[in-house]
Image (cartoon, helix red, strand yellow):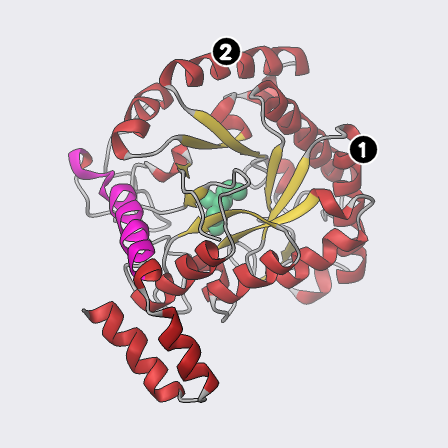
């Protein structure tokens, strides 16, 4: 059951190169300039933070937000592009310093929920039904600062409110074990799927697996994908790569470990990922050392690597694989995979 692939990324994936230790090194591109690039780079889908779609939204009324989002939809149409999802950016406001849905302060929790509803309005105006929640600050710096059982109840309660607010919206949780927090409450696909079961409409709560986030959790990204697929909950992916347990690197897909990337492509393709409209999202960052005029190569390279690995996945001698599995000759299977990747 082979998949059909369309590629997406977010405007934040073309960026100025600032990091916690130094300032921007490339000029900013306006959203309009970025949208002009999508098709040229081989991408048809745009992922949005709510305020990528509607800047300065905290100072706009709900009606103004919807109007601006509708204008953006026309711009996307003119470019032949589609929106994939909207994600409320809950980690930058002063009211979310200690988290959004799990903040200890009720006024801050109310802000987070209200902002999420505005993000749902934007999704509606863009004609899509997918809201991604990267639960950035829903965790702790020190164990004693929050109650982890209560935090799960608060997350469930907030998601329920979103499900009630819009009877069509699907909520897709992007798990990540750490950064910016020391510990996150929903670090893996298993946690996200379990949280979905606690919600009032579990069928509308799914998962976005990001390769680097799985690696930071010490897990194999393809296993995280398989887990979500087993629950029919893999609704989008953030493919990238990561060199060990350090800060979230968002390296180009397959740039660190070709075999690990191959296995992600293989499981997606084996289970027809994309056949129900799922996009292949690439959450990758250009190296800070990259000059402005060559600062989108991480996107084209990641897409190219995916397609090359897809060819390799589809040309693997699956009969031989089955034969070696049946004979439990995993050394030979190891060699078969490596020879195939090295050929
Ligand atoms: C953080 C991320 C984010 C999310 C994005 C959409 C910058 O580690 O991966 O990308 O994917 O905010 O939810
Ligand atoms: Mg991501």
Front residue of 22 and 122: 122
Where residue 16 sits: x, y (%)?
30, 37
In the displayed structure image, the side of residue 245 where residue 343 appears, left or right: left
State the residue position of label 1. Answer: 164
In what element is the residue under mark 2? helix
Q: Is residue 129 visible?
A: yes
Residue 90: numbered disc = none
Mark 1 or mark 2: name the one nearer the start of the chain. Answer: 2
Q: Residue shown at 74%/48% (left/top)?
A: 155
Where residue 290 sits: x, y (%)?
19, 44
In the displayed structure image, the side of residue 291 where residue 309 appears, left or right: right
Q: How many marks?
A: 2
In this rendering, the answer to whether 15 lies above or below 205 is above
| Among the 4 quarters of the image, the one containing residue 244 | bottom left
| Among the 4 quarters of the image, the one containing residue 93 | top right
Q: Is 133 contained in the magenta span?
A: no
Front residue of 64 and 235: 235
Where residue 221 sits: x, y (%)?
47, 63
In what element is the residue under mark 1? helix
Q: Is residue 252 visible?
A: no
State the residue position of label 2. Answer: 71
Q: Is 299 contained in the magenta span?
A: yes
Residue span colored magenta: 293-312
Q: Main secondary structure of the magenta part?
A: helix
């Amino acid at each position: 059951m082979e998949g059909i692939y369309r590629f997406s990324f977010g405007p934040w994936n073309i960026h100025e190169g600032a990091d916690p230790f130094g300032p921007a090194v490339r000029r900013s591109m306006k959203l309009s300039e970025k949208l002009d690039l999508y098709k040229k780079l081989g991408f048809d889908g745009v992922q949005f933070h709510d305020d990528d779609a509607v800047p300065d939204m905290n100072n706009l009324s709900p009606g103004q937000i919807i109007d601006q989002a509708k204008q953006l939809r026309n711009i996307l149409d003119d470019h032949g592009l589609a929106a994939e999802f909207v994600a409320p950016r809950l980690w930058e406001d002063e009211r979310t310093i200690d988290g959004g849905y799990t903040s200890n302060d009720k006024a801050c929790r109310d802000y987070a929920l209200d902002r999420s509803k505005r993000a749902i309005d934007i999704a509606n105006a863009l004609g899509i039904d997918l809201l991604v929640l990267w639960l950035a600050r829903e965790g702790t710096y020190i164990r004693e600062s929050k109650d982890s059982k209560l935090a799960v109840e608060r997350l469930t309660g907030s998601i329920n409110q979103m499900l009630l607010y819009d009877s069509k919206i699907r909520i897709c949780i992007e798990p990540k074990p750490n950064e910016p927090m020391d510990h996150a409450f929903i670090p893996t696909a298993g946690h996200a799927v379990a949280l979905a079961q606690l919600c009032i409409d579990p069928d509308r709560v799914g998962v976005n697996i990001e390769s680097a986030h799985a690696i930071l959790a010490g897990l194999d990204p393809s296993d995280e994908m398989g887990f979500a697929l087993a629950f029919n909950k893999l609704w989008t992916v953030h493919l990238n790569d990561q060199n060990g347990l350090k800060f979230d690197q968002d390296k180009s897909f397959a740039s660190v470990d070709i075999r690990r990337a191959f296995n992600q492509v293989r499981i997606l393709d084996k289970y027809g990922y994309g056949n129900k409209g799922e996009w292949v999202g690439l959450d990758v960052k250009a190296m800070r050392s990259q000059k402005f005029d060559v600062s989108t190569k991480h996107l084209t390279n990641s897409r190219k690597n995916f397609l090359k690995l897809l060819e390799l996945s589809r040309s693997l001698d699956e009969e031989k694989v089955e034969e070696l599995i049946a004979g439990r000759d995993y050394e030979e299977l190891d060699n078969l995979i490596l020879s195939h990747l090295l050929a």
